[in-house]
Image (tube, rainbow, N blue to C red):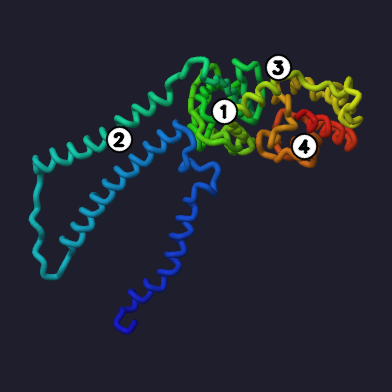
Amino acid sequence: MPNLSVPSRRLLRWIPALTLGVLLLLAACAPEQYPQTTLLPRANTARDQDHLFRLTLWWALVVFVLVEGALLIAIWKFRSRPDAPEPVQTHGNTTLEIVWTIIPAFILAMIAVPTVRTIFKTAAKPVGDDVLQVEVIGHQWWWEFRYPQLGITTASELKIPMGRTVNLEMTTVDVLHSFWLPQFAGKRDVFPNRYNNLWFKAEVTGNFPAQCTEFCGIQHGRMAYRIVSLDGPAFDAWAANFNAPPRDFVADSTANALVKQGQGLFAAKACSGCHSMYPALPLIGPNLHHVGSRSHIAAGTLENTDENLAKWIQNPQAWKKGVLMPNLGLTDDETHALVAYLRANQ
Ligand code: CUA
C-alpha cells in the first residue's frame, strides 16, 4: 500500500475485524437457531404482525436513506473552504413546506392504515364450534390454562391443535403479566378483573419455549411455559386421555410399591392442598393431572426428569425463591416415592 496515507492504512486494518463483526451480527439473525425469535412466524397472526414490521422497516429505510442522503450532500456541498463564498441564505419556501408536509403525511398513512387494520384483526373474537377456546390465567409465577369446551384445567404447557383457530381469553389473579407466543401471535398484557384476547391458527407442530414478558415480581424471569402444537388427531387423543380421572395406583394391584407410597404421601403431605390431580379442578397451585407427560416442570424452567423433580419438590425455594410452594422437609425416601408417583401420572 505505497500510495495510501497513514489514516487510510489505519482504516484498512479494521476491515477484517469489521467483516467479522458484521458476520457475527448476521449470524444472530438466523431464526431457526432461536426458538423465541419473532422473525420466523408460524401462525397467521404472527405472519400479519411480521408483515407490518417489515412494511414499517422498509418505509423507515426509505426515510433514512433520503434524509441522511440529503444531509451528506449538504455537508459535502456546503463544506467550509478557504476561498469559498458564503452559500445563498434562504428563509421560508412555501412549495418546500408543502412538499415536506405532504410526503411524511403520506408515509404515515401508508403505515397507519395497515397497522389499524391489523390491530382490529388480531383483537377480533373468533366464535363457533370449530374455534378452540382457552382461558389463560396468570399467577405469580406460572400460567394456568383452562379449556371450557373440553372440561380441562392444566398448567405451564399450552397444548394447541395445528390448523385450528385457537382463541385465548386472558386474565390474571394477581399482578400484571404478559402472555407471549413469539412465533404464533405476539404478546398481550393481562390485567386483573379484565379479559384480553388473542387468536391464531398454528401452521406447524412442535414444542416451543415462551416467557412472561411483563415484570411481575422477583421470579418474573422464571415464569416460563411451553406451547405444544399437536396435529389434529394427536390433540384429540391428548384431550380424551386427559379428561379421564387420575389413575388410582393404591387400588391397582399391578402398580409399583413406590408409586403407591408416593400417592399416599401426596394426599398425606401438604401437596394435595394446593395441587389438584383431577383434570377439571383448579386449586391454588398448578394442576398436576398428567404432570408426568409434561416436557418441563417448575413453570417451564426445568426439564421434567426424576432428578429435577426431586430437586424441585425437596427445595423449591432454592430454584425459585419466593414461590408459594414451601419446603416441606421431605426425606430422600419420601421425595423418591413422590417423584415416582408424579412421573407415573402420564
Ligand atoms: Cu409474569 Cu412476568
Position of 14 with respect to 239 (left or right) is left
Where residue 290 sits in the image (x, y, percent)?
A: 73, 27
For disc 3, the marked residue is: 281
> Looking at this rendering, what residue extends furthest in the bottom direction?
2
Task: Pick whichever, 281 or 270, lies toward us.
Answer: 281
**In the rendered structure, which disc, 1 or 2, sits on the residue that comes first in sequence?**
2
Residue 113 sits above or below residue 107 on the image: above
The amino acid on which the numbered mark 4 sits, given as a three-letter code, is Leu
Task: Pick whichever, 3 or 297, lies toward us.
Answer: 297
For disc 4, the marked residue is: 309
The amino acid on which the numbered mark 3 sits, given as a three-letter code, is Leu
Do tag 3 and tag 2 residues touch (Cβ < 8 Å)? no
Q: Nearer the viewer, mark 1 or mark 3?
A: 1
For disc 2, the marked residue is: 111
Between marks 1 and 4, how big is the CA–CA gap? 28 Å
The amino acid on which the numbered mark 2 sits, given as a three-letter code, is Ile
Where residue 39 sits in the image (x, y, percent)?
A: 46, 43
Position of 56 with respect to 284 (left or right) is left
Q: Nearer the viewer, mark 1 or mark 4?
A: 1
Q: Is residue 191 visible?
A: no
Do tag 3 and tag 4 residues touch (Cβ < 8 Å)? no
The amino acid on which the numbered mark 1 sits, given as a three-letter code, is Pro
Q: Secondary structure at mark 1?
A: strand
Q: Secondary structure at mark 3?
A: loop
Q: Residues within 10 Å of mark 3 (few under 14, many from 20)?
A: some
